[in-house]
Image (cartoon, rainbow, N blue to C red):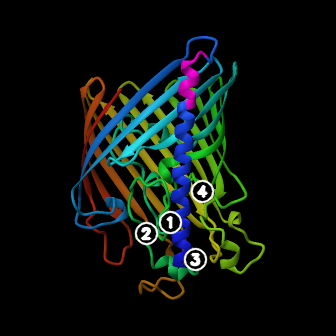
Amino acid sequence: MNAFQDQKTIKNQRVFDRISTRICAAALVLVLLLAGTGFAQRASKIIIGGIASTTAWLPGDAATPLSSGGTYPTLNNRFILLFDFEIDEALSAFASLESYQGNSPVFYAIGLNWRLSKSPDLLLRAGKFPAPFGNFLPRRYDSENALIGRPLAYFYQHNLSATVVPESYDELLQTRGSGSGNGYSNTQQNGEGMRFFGREAYISGLQLLGQMNRLRYGIAVTNGAFSTSANTNHSDRFNIAGHVQYMPMLGLQIGASFSSGAYLETDEASYQTGYSYKKTEDYRQTLVGADLSYSAGHLELWGEFLRNSYGSPYLIDKLGTNSWSAEAKYKINARIYLAGRWSTLLFDNVPDENDVDSDGATRESWDYDVSQLELGFGYRIHRNGYAKLTHRLNRTHDAPNGDPADDVTALQLVVFF
């Protein structure tokens, strides 16, 4: 893909973003009008919530994907408005309006819920909504996250791109460790790497949610893969995703997840590979996962495993990654708690026939293996407010120049209603 085509792709994405935002805003206004004009047979309910957070980041001396991509102290502000409109007993609408660093608000989530049945509980959701995967995403908001960071699988930006396709293993290996951090962009930038869960893990499409006794499930058909933009998709196929959760006993929950969808944000894949029978949708991002959570008294535990793989046009091997995370939270009293999380990403080995890093190895991980230990505590300053202090111990394994000095200390103030 040449520079002109890159610029054209970015321009088209921005135009689409503006149009989709206006459509979402119009839909929200329409729902408000319906809720206020007696559309329902009984009084409609409007519930509004909000989350505001300020985070001070104190990174180390090295700019890496683990350090949020910078070496200078920064202050990040985020504000979220959550809307829920009950139109009638069966129909409701939802929206999440988010602003980061004072930028124009973006509808990260907006849509309709239609309750098909109360027994068994069955609901159909249409619009833009959080991805049904794992047990961290339901806790992704700063008001619910015991720590400040996220598990590596949910924020680390690896070196593979959705817009610039590597033509050899050498090209891919030469970009190891080059992801640009965990910013909150909801579109993929040309030439940069990806996260396994892009655009804050929101997706567009249809979702069926249900509950039968101790079993809960969510199955979604969406536009594009988890790693790429929710607003653009050059594939003729949909992404299929789902999460199933079972509670065998009080306090214990066991879950499993799956997702598969085309991730390339270019419609030139067949031309680039030279194979006429290969199309953009033939190169997919596939994820499978298992999760576990347990709570008893003052203690809460979470664990998650994730296996991600990409197909890439010029590369024979699938580009796979294993991710593990374990998290604990312990309440000392009504105001103070301690928390910790360990997570790691282990990238599969691929051929290194030309020894790009001159270490003599003939196979290398396609990005550097990384691990992180985040430790911290929280203090409830108010019924609806927390102060958190955490420190991240970051490790990049097998980097040619050794492990970079990219540990991060963070202080966060979050209030919610």
CA–CA distance between discs 3 and 2?
Answer: 26 Å
x and y percent of residue 376 in the render? 27, 43
- Residue at numbered disc 3: 1
Q: Mark 1 to mark 4: distance in Å?
A: 27 Å
Give me the C-alpha separation between circle 1 and circle 2. 7 Å
Contact check, label 1 and label 2, Cβ < 8 Å? yes
Q: Label 3: how many residues lie within 10 Å, few (<14), some (14-19) or many (20+)?
A: few
Determine whether the residue tagged by mark 2 lies in a helix, strand or loop.
loop
* Alpha carbon separation for disc pair 3 and 4: 17 Å
Q: Which residue is mark 4?
A: 232
Q: Quadrant of residue 48?
A: top left
Mark 4 residue type: Thr
Residue 88 at least partly seen: yes
Task: Look at the magenta stretch and give its main secondary structure.
Answer: helix
Do tag 3 and tag 4 residues touch (Cβ < 8 Å)? no
Q: Residues within 10 Å of mark 1 (few under 14, many from 20)?
A: many
In this orientation, does residue 227 appear?
A: no
**Residue with the most extreme top position:** 42
Amino acid at dot 2: Tyr
SS for callout 4: loop
**3 and 1 marks in contact (CB < 8 Å):** no
